[in-house]
Image (cartoon, rainbow, N blue to C red):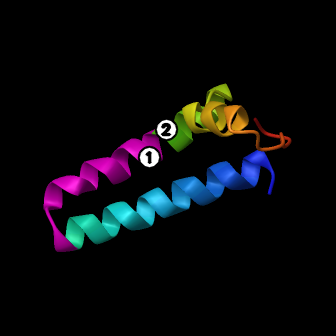
């Protein structure tokens, strides 16, 4: 799996997890969804993604976007 796909999969998992936590634990977990969404938006414009940096250090092969 490439770095790009890993970042997208991680973002999707985080969004789904935050929705489940919002529904089952506390409505305040909606802020996790907001954080993930804002991070995805800023990485689309700047190309900077903290998750991509972590995955790169873990040895995931680079993709086209990051």
Q: Determine which residue is flagged by label 1.
A: 36
Examine the structure image and report whether residue 37 is included in the region drawn in magenta: yes
Q: Position of residue 55 (x, y in %)?
A: 66, 40
Q: Residue furthest front?
A: 58
Crowd rating for badge 2 (residues with CA inside 10 Å; few <14, some 14–19, many 20+): some
Residue pictured at 75% horizontal, 46% vertical: 3
Asked where in the image residue 23 lies, by quadrant, the reply is bottom left
Residue pictured at 86% horizontal, 41% vertical: 64
The quarter in which the N terminus is drawn is: bottom right
Q: Which residues are magenta?
A: 24-38
Camera-side residue of 25 and 27: 25
Crowd rating for badge 1 (residues with CA inside 10 Å; few <14, some 14–19, many 20+): some
| Pointers 1 and 2 in contact (C-beta within 8 Å) | yes
Q: Which mark is residue 39?
A: 2
Asked where in the image residue 5 lies, by quadrant, the reply is bottom right
The quarter in which the C terminus is drawn is: top right
Residue 49, relative to residue 61: is it above or below? above
Give the prevailing secondary structure in the magenta stretch. helix
Residue pictured at 19% horizontal, 73% vertical: 24
Q: Position of residue 39 (x, y in %)?
A: 49, 38
């Amino acid at each position: 799996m490439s770095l790009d796909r890993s970042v997208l999969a991680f973002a999707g998992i985080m969004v789904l997890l935050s929705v489940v936590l919002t529904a089952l634990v506390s409505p305040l977990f909606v802020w996790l969804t907001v954080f993930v969404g804002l991070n995805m938006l800023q990485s689309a414009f700047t190309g900077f993604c903290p998750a991509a940096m972590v995955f790169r250090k873990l040895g995931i092969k680079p993709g086209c976007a990051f």
